[in-house]
Amino acid sequence: MSLQVAAPGIHATALIDPLAQLDSTVSVGPYTVIGPHVKVGAGTTIGAHCVIEGHTTIGRDNRIFQFNSLGAIPQDKKYAGEPCELVIGDRNTIREFCTFNIGSPGDNGVTRVGDDNWIMAYVHLAHDCVVGNHTIFANNTQLAGHVQVGDWVILGGFTVVHQFVRLGAHSMTAMCALLFADLPPFVMSQGQPAAARSMNFEGLRRRGFSPERISAVKAMHKALYREDLTLEQAQKRIAGLSETYPESAPDVHMMLSFLERTSPQRGIVR
């Protein structure tokens, strides 16, 4: 490690390895440590007392607050030093005391965070998690390994997600939800274990969904949760919604694609 004191925005007490690649516009707070395989894009700010290590790539205009640990090795006994990665996109806010681990060789080897996410304090992303764009993780959200989170997902405080679980786009959990099964797109869930309560209609309105698209989402909810259908029967019912609500065809396709990839062993939140 070497002290970098000449670069603008780098505090004199920050320890930045000479091999690290930081854009000249990056700012780094006091006592932060950055390892040799780290890359940080333009406009990103890193607070005090952070540790950023491993093969970690961070994009542009992120706000990383103090006391974060990014890029540490996975909490996986099988990990044996392989050069796995953490990749963080652009314009994310990462609040205090978060822990994001690199991937593992048992998967794609990459933990990935997209763009424009709002991640609050004490969030944990285990190895090989994949987070989309425009998500909100409230305080103390905890994701086990290999979890996949779609775009616009909102996770309430103290939500806990079991390994390999998938959360579809626009879904939402209440505070202290415990997810053992896949959460389909648009579904709001609550409880331990989490159960489906409704669809995220207010969130869809705020994102500009038309009345026709929202009507199709209501029909999906009815097929999945109100008509006592098997999952296979519900999928057939949902497939026909594109004809009734032509504007909703992309939403129907997204729901069907999600359900088709649900394993019988895990199932969906009911």
Image (cartoon, rainbow, N blue to C red):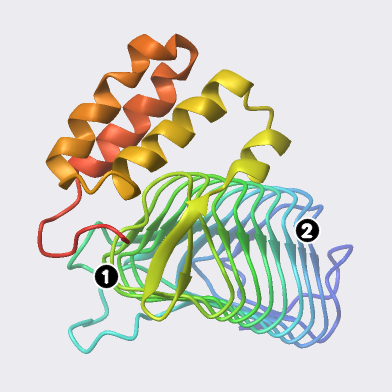
Residue 248: where, in percent of width, then height? Answer: 46, 19
Residue furthest out toward the right: 8
**Residue at image mark 1:** 104
- Relative to residue 123, is residue 80 drawn left or right? left
Residue 137: where, in percent of width, then height? Answer: 61, 66
Kindly indicate the quadrant of the structure image that contains residue 143: bottom left
Element assignment for label 2: loop
Mark 1 or 2: the one toward you: 1
Counting residues from the N terminus, which is met first, the one under dot 1 or under dot 2? 2
Sort mark 2 into few (<14), some (14-19) or many (20+) by Cα contacts within 10 Å: many
Vertical placement of residue 222 versus 208, above or below: below
Kindly indicate the quadrant of the structure image that contains residue 254: top left
Element assignment for label 1: loop
Q: Amino acid at mark 1?
A: Ser
Question: Residue shown at 48%/75% (left/top)?
Answer: 177
Question: Residue shown at 55%/29% (left/top)?
Answer: 214
* Numbered label tally: 2
Sort mark 1 into few (<14), some (14-19) or many (20+) by Cα contacts within 10 Å: many
Vertical placement of residue 88 versus 163, above or below: above
- Relative to residue 161, is residue 105 drawn left or right? left
**Residue at image mark 2:** 26
